[in-house]
Image (tube, rainbow, N blue to C red):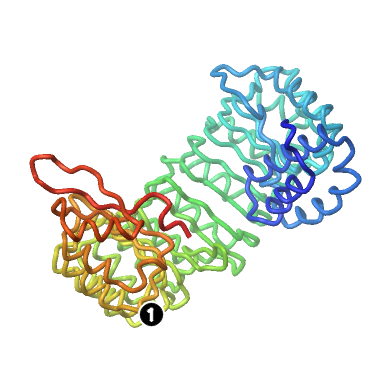
Amino acid sequence: MTAAWSEASAFGELRSLVSGRPSEGAFSRVCDVIDEAEEAAPGLHASRWREYVASQLERWPASMRVVGLPRESDDDDLDSYRWRDELRSCWEASEGAWSELVRGVTLRAFDLTSEEMSGWLARDLREIFPLLEHLGFAYLFVRKKELERACEAGVFDGLSSLSISDGDLRPTTFETFMGHLERLGTLRRLELESCRLGPHQLERLCLSSLVPGLEVLSLSGNGSLKNEGFGHLAEAAPRFESLRELRLDWLTISAKSAVALAGADWAPTLERISFENSGIKGTGLKGFVDAGRIGLLAREVGGVVSLDLANQELKDRGVVALACCEELTRVESLSLFGNGITKLARLASSPYIEDIRGWDLSGNEFADEEARHVLAIALRSRPRALALNGMMLGDAFLVDLFAMGESSELEALNISTSPGYGAAGLEALLDWPRLSELTGLQCVFRVERETELVARALATGLFETTNDNPYTGLVRVVAKPGAFDG
């Protein structure tokens, strides 16, 4: 705590946090701000802030109103008993000021082998946080006997949300676990990420009585699910009557599995399926296009409908499938980063891309002749953001791009590449009338030193030079850090 603390600045930060996008990090900071306020002005939260903060947090899901234990630690070997002492001291120091706001706790590397710790979870944790709905475990390794003891102690009673990441839920342990959760019947959100689940565990989950009530299910990071496991999931789709979100990130999903999931009989409640970094192939994407379900892969962030297909394996077949997708008319931002794409002609001529205002085509393998198709995309959709990182499309492309002049709506542009564009490209950028209006620019130009062009770039105050190989007689011109921060 510093002497510069003031109620006005503290409440300003608090208001920004609770009215912003929900996240565990933001909620943790909310608790810190309240702690700082209680230290500087005891009773302030209860008398002036509590009602406002509680009302703003009502829209936050329980899984975001979470504190992690230990809250701060650099120890490699964490002591479970220390967590209890740390939590109680935190709570007592603030006189429980933020405990009523908490809906969940995440325990890192928690030791469930101790009967005493299972009892503590069931009793003390709920005494401190009486409105607990969510419990998370990070790095949980537990055997069947220990899990049974935790269940009997009531560790999972009354939860609507449960998250286990980097756990070891082997078949017999998983069976015990599922049986207990079924008897409780309260779960609406279940995250089992990187828990070594295989097809048989997923089949057991799909057949469980939990399924009709689940609203969010995450199976990310379970790399052994295979076609068999995803087949069980697709067959069970009609049973997921309440499911809104299905997360299947960081997996290897074959074209066969993707097509099966796309064509499954999901309830109308399903809003999104997430496949981040799961190696979706072009044929798999075509399954979603043919089923009219590409919208399930999109999400709305800040009022913008975004379709993020980065780091998949779409290749050219995926681009052809997208070009035929009428649902693209509802997409405002599209990322095809790192998909091994070599040809864009079909997408550039698609009648459905004109409303896409954000494009990321970086990290692909376009030949020089594809520059005209990238330009066609820019001319047809008039993007506000265009990322072409790592792609060398030639100075002629930049000359044509900036020839759009005032009609261009670009606000953010990434044309960083190695070794860099040349003098003609830099001159076209400097001549562009909207240069100073950019709110984001990343670029590399490799030009001769000590020239009028370099002097002109530096005179704008927006660029700086970095050394190239001293034997080449060239210099790199790049955007100055912070010069284009919107």
Percent of width and height locating residue 155: 74, 32
Quadrant position of residue 301: bottom right
Give the residue displayed 18% in from the left and 48% down from the top: 475
Give the residue displayed 33% in from the left and 59% down from the top: 414
Measured along the vertical axis of the image, is residue 414 above or below residue 7? below
Residue at numbered disc 1: 354
- In this view, the residue farthest toward the left is 471
Please give left or right for residue 221 compared with residue 105 in the image. Answer: left
Measured along the vertical axis of the image, is residue 139 above or below residue 198? above
Q: 8 or 147, which is in the foreground?
A: 8
Quadrant position of residue 122: top right
Q: For the N terminus, which image quadrant?
A: top right
Percent of width and height locating residue 39: 81, 32
Please give left or right for residue 236 compared with residue 318 in the image. Answer: right
Measured along the vertical axis of the image, is residue 91 above or below residue 221? above
Total numbered labels = 1
Q: Amino acid at mark 1?
A: Glu
Percent of width and height locating residue 100: 83, 42
Q: Residues within 10 Å of mark 1 (few under 14, many from 20)?
A: some
Disc 1, SS: loop
Q: 246 or 213, which is in the foreground?
A: 246
Percent of width and height locating residue 218: 55, 48
Quadrant position of residue 33: top right
Measured along the vertical axis of the image, is residue 162 above or below residue 52? above
Give the residue displayed 84% in from the left and 27% down from the top: 92
Q: 374 or 142, which is in the foreground?
A: 374
